[in-house]
Amino acid sequence: MSALCSGSIKSLSRRKNIVWPFCKYIYNMNHQASGGVEFLRRGNNNCLAYRWTKRSAPRPRVSDCEADQRQDDHHGEVRPSDVGHFNANGIMFLPGFLSNMNGGKALALEQFCKQSNYEFTRFDYQGCGESKGEINMNGTVFDVWKDDALAVLDNLTTGPQVLVGSSMGGAIMLLLALERPERVHSLVGIATPNYDKPFEIQIQADGNTKTKTSFDYIGQQNRDILASKSLAIQRPLRFIHGMQDDVVGYESALELANKVESEDVQVILQKSGSHRMSTPEGLQLMLKTVQDLLRINSRL
């Protein structure tokens, strides 16, 4: 039985803690199913848990202008059925640091995809959530989680994907877009940190608290890529950030927008939004952003 601990992450310039359940660790390839959750083998008898929503039969397409009119008729509310035509695109959600696939954003996206006839994939990083194994919180755990996301993209998804990354998942999302540009339709980063700056991490285990920074768990290669002055990403990209975020300042979204090479980049700020962006208003903003991106031709 592996021991569990809890941790929190915060900006060096901000003091409020956000606490998630800490994770267990793991690492290759093969599917198992258990009560709706499936597993991707990653070696050493370790498994990565995931849930996959497949597309249903094709439905008649609703034109974009018709969908816009329906949205106007419902006061701007996102109505998934308005974009419910069959489409080759899928959506993949990347959780944040020490988080899992069962958060509010992932579940809202899953419901949207079920109603809209889009493939959707959510997963737990090695050792996190419903995955199996133990966590070794060393200097390369970020790199292991990034490899998890790449394995999910390569082995569990089909067609161009809209990558939606939350916090650290947004940074991993950028690395995937650099390594697999042909598999990426567009990107949505929510409270995405700029790895030019370290983040303070407090790990609580066995009654003791240890303080580290984000640079202590990311390998030098990925750190250098994310800290570079330019990111060769050409896909449409949206950075959503809450202006009340006391974990990752919203200035990070502006900095990242300047880094990426794509000209189709928007920074969307929600004045009342916090780091999690999981309020009804935050979820609605995320879904509306994804919906707008899905209307872009998949063959960019």
Image (cartoon, rainbow, N blue to C red):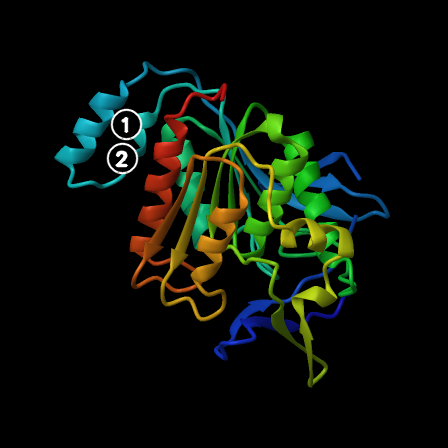
Say if 246 sits above or below 209 in the image.
above
Marks 2,1: beta carbons within 8 A: yes
Say if 171 sits above or below 265 in the image.
below
Where residue 20 sits: x, y (%)? 56, 67
> Mark 1 falls on what kind of element?
helix
Q: Is residue 221 left or right of residue 198?
A: right
Identify which residue, 39 or 176, lies in the foreground.
Answer: 176
**Which residue position holds label 1?**
82
Q: Residue at x 69, y 74 (%)?
A: 212
Using the image, tell me which numbered label, if any, was put on residue 79. Answer: 2
Identify which residue, 86 or 267, lies in the foreground.
Answer: 267
Where residue 78 sits: x, y (%)? 27, 39
Q: Is residue 103 visible?
A: no
Q: Residue at x 65, y 46 (%)?
A: 49
Q: Residues within 10 Å of mark 2 (few under 14, many from 20)?
A: some
Amino acid, disc 2: Arg
Q: Residue furthest right?
A: 44
Amino acid, disc 1: Asp
Q: Residue at x 40, y 56 (%)?
A: 241
| Quarter placement of the N terminus | bottom right
- Quarter assignment of residue 292: top left
> Mark 2 falls on what kind of element?
loop
Where residue 24 sits: x, y (%)? 72, 61
Q: Residues within 10 Å of mark 1 (few under 14, many from 20)?
A: many
